[in-house]
């Protein structure tokens, strides 16, 4: 562990509570605009399309397309499927940008600030750079660098993302730890030679979450939250 | 000017005083190791090789090579030319990394901090990401994002750098301003459609500097230093 120099972080779910943020913001938007819908169902549908939409890029069925644009295509489909009336182009653009304003979990900013005192810290997210920069400015995430998927034109778990971040940091993978709430992300990072840190976020997907409740691999560190991770890493 | 959303900054010379920093650090290193040399001449020779070494990459004579590696090749040549004895591999690696620890000009941190309150701020430098991250951590430069040349695998003034930064920020070039102490950098940015801000750094190259003393183009803003630029931009 002593040789670790940089920590890179999954963002959606690991650092920010996308589901509660989007449901709250869509509810407020709907109230203000007089549009009603089952916003929780829309948010769950939006996220359900996340991996399949990126898979089309990973497989080459779609050319490189950043997450903002995948989100927008999914949103248009869902608005039609849920028969939500009265949302014009400006409304849809506004709703799509709610992903740029997701709120951090209560321990995120304290944890990152502590970890930054000892390690280089950066997100490694399937979000695009502009989304991650907006998110960091709004939520005060004190990044040293921002690795969006559009830097690499690949989505996790493609190895180009993990290894690309290590290359830009000029560090061998063994000196970089991925911190994530998702076992599959950590498994892919480990296959690339990175160190791994698991933080459970058992309500990321809502009250009935059935996945990623516990560590499912022999990760280098398992911590209850980011301050606990910082303590274990001496930060 | 009201439409500007992001400011991107040249780094060497514009934000950090590379010449004084390197001369001071090499002098201290030489004293500690009992190695004497004309360090100012070595630093000036190092910088004189900067553009020619990048030009070989721009022309395709060299494949993509990051600045740390160009710096190291130049350093080895200069150590031989100046007949400096007693510098082993660890010494040379240490000296090369002095570029990661350059000191900011006295107004840099205050200026960037003010500008960050209103604009997205990021370096756009021919330095590599790891150099820029180390520099920012040591000098407390509060970046939102870090655009090193290795993100684009192109050196300024190749348009891929200016336009690549705008694309990752998801902004049209007219909403992005390059801030630099070098007229040629600003001219290249303007050709790509970016806004331009000139800050003179009349001692960057030492007491007899003869270039970039004043604005040589109709730049959108000319300011005495970064706080003055911030004031002119309402930050």
Image (spheres, coloured by chain):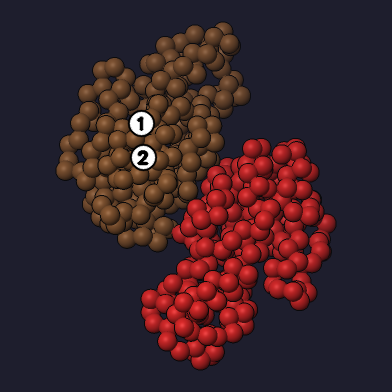
Chain colours: A red, B brown
Tell which of A213 and A28 is nearer to you. Answer: A28
Residue A168 coordinates in the image, percent (x, y)? 54, 47
The residue tagged 2 is B10
Residue B103 relative to residue A108: left or right: left
Residue B132 relative to residue A188: left or right: left
Crowding near pointer 1: few (<14 within 10 Å), some, many (20+)?
many
The residue tagged 1 is B13
Is residue B124 something that shows in the picture?
no
| Residue at 74% from the left image edge and 74% from the top image edge | A207
Residues under numbered marks 2 and 1 in contact, where contact means CB atoms less than 8 Å apart: yes
* SS at circle 1: loop
Quadrant containing the N terminus of chain A is top right
Q: Which mark is residue A178?
A: none
**Figure check: B95 above or below A16:** above
* SS at circle 2: loop
**Figure check: A107 above or below A67:** above
Tell which of A18 and B56 is nearer to you. Answer: A18
């Amino acid at each position: 562990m002593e040789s670790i120099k940089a920590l890179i972080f999954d963002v959606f779910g690991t650092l920010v509570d996308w589901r509660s943020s989007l449901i709250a913001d869509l509810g407020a938007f709907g109230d203000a605009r007089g549009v009603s819908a089952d916003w929780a169902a829309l948010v769950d549908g939006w996220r359900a399309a996340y991996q399949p939409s990126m898979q089309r890029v990973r497989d080459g069925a779609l050319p490189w397309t950043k997450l903002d644009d995948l989100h927008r295509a999914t949103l248009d489909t869902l608005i039609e499927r849920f028969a939500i009336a009265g949302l014009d182009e400006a409304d849809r653009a506004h709703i799509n940008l709610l992903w740029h304003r997701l709120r951090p979990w209560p321990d995120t900013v304290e944890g990152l600030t502590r970890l930054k005192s000892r390690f280089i810290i950066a997100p490694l997210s399937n979000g695009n750079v502009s989304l991650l920069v907006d998110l960091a400015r709004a939520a005060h995430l004190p990044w040293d660098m921002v690795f969006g998927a559009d830097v690499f034109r690949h989505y996790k778990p493609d190895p180009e993302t993990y290894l690309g971040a290590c290359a830009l940091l000029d560090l061998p993978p063994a000196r970089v730890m991925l911190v994530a709430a998702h076992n599959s992300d950590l498994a892919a990072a480990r296959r690339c030679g990175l160190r791994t840190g698991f933080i459970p976020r058992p309500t990321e997907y809502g009250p009935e979450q059935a996945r990623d409740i516990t560590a499912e691999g022999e990760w280098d560190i398992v911590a209850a939250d980011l301050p606990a991770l910082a303590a274990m890493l001496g930060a």
